[in-house]
Structure formats: structure tokens, C-alpha cells
Image (cartoon, helix red, strand yellow):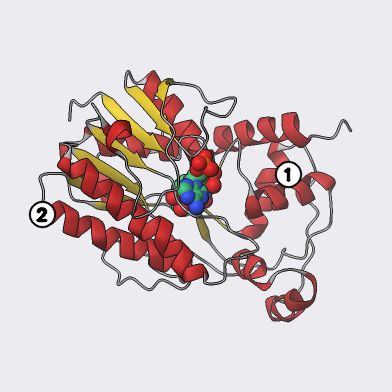
Amino acid sequence: MSARNVLVTGAGGFIGRHVCALLALGGYRVRGTGRRSTPAGGITGLKDWMPVGAVDANTDWSGVLEGMEVVVHLAGRAHVMHDRADDPLAEYRRVNLAGTENLARQAARLGVKRFVFMSSVKVHGESTGVARGFTENDAPNPGDAYALSKWEAEQALRRVSDESEMEIVVLRPPLVYGPGVGANFLRLMRVVDLGWPLPFAWIRNSRSLIYVGNLADAVRACLESESAAGRTYLVKDMDVSTPELIRMMAGALNRRARLFGVPPALLRGGAWLVLRPRMMQRLLDSLVIDDAHIRRELSWSPPVPVPEALARTALWFRQMYGRTS
Ligand SMILES: NC(=O)c1ccc[n+]([C@@H]2O[C@H](COP(=O)([O-])OP(=O)(O)OC[C@H]3O[C@@H](n4cnc5c(N)ncnc54)[C@H](OP(=O)(O)O)[C@@H]3O)[C@@H](O)[C@H]2O)c1
């Protein structure tokens, strides 16, 4: 595809900032959008910024979409740690399903050629075995309201595409890390940096992750490749066990990893007392992706090697939170 005018929704978010910067470097004219009237500080690569109100079934995107050839839709309800919504599923559906479908229908009507949607591996479920990862052909099995809203949005996008000329590309990444990361990855980095002893030495799991710069490059590939039209891709840049990840983080932070062994069954039981069980589940279970499709069909491979990706993340962490000793 030779499209140059790209709209990025959620441009002020963690992934959005990296996508805008990378696309601008690649010569795209990037319009960012979000709920703020002006872009948050530190966003680079924007040609312009057009605010939009709430993202739901009633959002009027006509002005924002004017002149756009491609949409990268990142805005979505995600990372909600303490959900205060009376009906969380309804809220996820309002933003992630109805908001996405409404944007896509308006985009198709206004002649947008391609729509790249950031879904999630969680569409497939919460865990796998260590050896065999999810493929795009595995049946969807969303395990929570967030994942269900993403899966329903994917299906709505297929309907929009069937009724129009607009091409849909869906990316399903696992946990994304890099400068600006929050939630559980940031929490783990903090405790590793503090040198706390962690009881994960005996964990033999495997989890797929992707560096945000590599995910942004996968978005670029989805914009540029003819073969991506209509496709869905799982994407990652590493598989790592929890103790390996802690050692790699510690190395990048120039700290010593302090790991000791506790039987996983005991950890699962104890998790109810000390940590949120869902966070513990992610530290103990496997969630692996098979990314053969995107590598083969788009000839894509992650441009940033994992050690470099972790070094960049650690540098950012030091600047934001780093201790002096
Ligand atoms: N980070 C991950 O590990 C990961 C993994 C898989 C998939 N994803 C998906 O990737 C996309 C970007 O995630 P991210 O990590 O960059 O998250 P983020 O930093 O929280 O950014 C999400 C963006 O969505 C917008 N948004 C959030 N809640 C909204 C709501 N209720 N109504 C309208 N807009 C809302 C925000 O826009 P404002 O700037 O207007 O607040 C923000 O820019 C999301 O769709 C997420 O589901 C993320």
C-alpha cells in the first residue's frame, strides 16, 4: 500500500506514542487523536492532532477522518486494575466494540483503504502449555470482559469489511513492554530494582512478550504489505520464563537478581493472601504465541533485538524511577 496519511487513535497512549514516532520516521503524515484537546507532552511525529470526545457508538469522526487513507485504531479500554464500572462488560463493549465498529463504519464510508486494529492474544484465552503456543487458527476463548469485547470488535470489523472496500488487519499482541510501560511489568521492574528476593526460581513457565518498538514496526508492516489485507496476526519478540525475565530485567538494570525456590502449588495458594491472584497467575502460568504467520506472510521480523529492547526499557525506568545506588 502506498498510503501516507494515517490516523492513529489512542495516539497519546503507551503504544500510540511509539507508533506515531515510528510511522513519522518512515515518512507517513500522522494525525493523532485522543480525548485531550491538545496532545500530551512528549508525543513526537505528529503532523497534527484532532481531539475526539468519548469513543463509543455515537462518536462523530467525520472531521478527524477527513483526508485519511489508513486508520490505526489503538484507543481502547484496557489496563483497568480496579474497575469501578457498575457493569464492566457493558463498559468494555461501549468503547471497544461499539466504539470500534462506529469508527470503522465511518472510515469505510469516507473511503479509508485499510484499518489496522489492535486486539489482544487474550482473545484466545489466558494460558497455554509451555511448548505449544496459540496460532491464529485456534478457536477464540476470551476469558474476561476485556478479551470478549476485543473478540466481538474483531467480528464487527469483519462485517464492516464484507460490506465495504475497506481492508481490515488485526494484530493480537501479548504483554507489551518498553519505555512508558505500566501495570504488572512496571511493578515487577520496581521490585527487581529494589533487590527484593522473589520466590520464582522453580517456575518453569513460558510467556510471549513484545517490545513496543517492535510492535510499532509490525503495525508499519501491516500498513505496507499487500498480503496483510484481511489477515489476523499474533505477534511477539520473545518467549521467556518468569525467572529468566527477572534475571534479564536485573541485568538490564545492573542489579543482582535475587530468586529463591518455592513450590508453585504453594505460591498459588499463598497468592490469595499476598498478591492479586491474577497477577500471580501471570507469573506462574504460560501464555505462548506462535508467530509463524506474520513472519512468513509479511516477511516480518522484530527489528530491535531483545537485549537492546530491555536496555532501552531499563534506561527509561532509571530516568523515571531510578535509584542512585
Ligand atoms: N499494552 C499492552 O500490553 C497491550 C497488549 C495487547 C493489546 N493492547 C491494546 O493496545 C491498545 C493500546 O494500549 P496501550 O497499552 O497503549 O494503552 P494505554 O496507554 O492505556 O492507551 C490506551 C488509549 O486508549 C484511549 N482510551 C482508554 N480508555 C478509553 C475510553 N474509555 N474511551 C476512549 N478512549 C480510551 C486512551 O486515550 P486518551 O489519550 O484519550 O486517554 C489511550 O490513549 C489498546 O487497544 C489495548 O487494548 C495493549
For label 1, the crowd category at 10 Å Cα-Cα, with few meaning under 14, some 14 to 19 and many 20 or more, is: many
Label number found at residue 250? 1
Picture residue at 25% right of the left edge, 34% below the top = 70
Which amino acid, by three-letter code, is at mark 2?
Answer: Glu
Q: Which residue is mark 2?
A: 163
Q: Earlier in the sequence, mark 1 or mark 2?
A: 2
Query: In the figure, residue 203 lies in which quadrant?
Result: bottom right
Instruction: Report the side of 260 relative to 234 (left or right).
Output: right
Label number found at residue 15? none
Residue 180 place in picture, x, y as percent: 61, 37
Asked if one can make out residue 131 in the rendered structure from this viewpoint, the answer is no
Which amino acid, by three-letter code, is at mark 1?
Answer: Ala
Picture residue at 79% right of the left edge, 34% below the top = 322
Q: Nearer the viewer, residue 215 or 156?
A: 156
User: Which SS class for mark 2?
Assistant: loop
Tell me the quarter of the image containing the N terminus. Answer: top left
For label 2, the crowd category at 10 Å Cα-Cα, with few meaning under 14, some 14 to 19 and many 20 or more, is: few
Picture residue at 55% right of the left edge, 35% below the top = 309
Tell me the quarter of the image containing the C terminus. Answer: top right
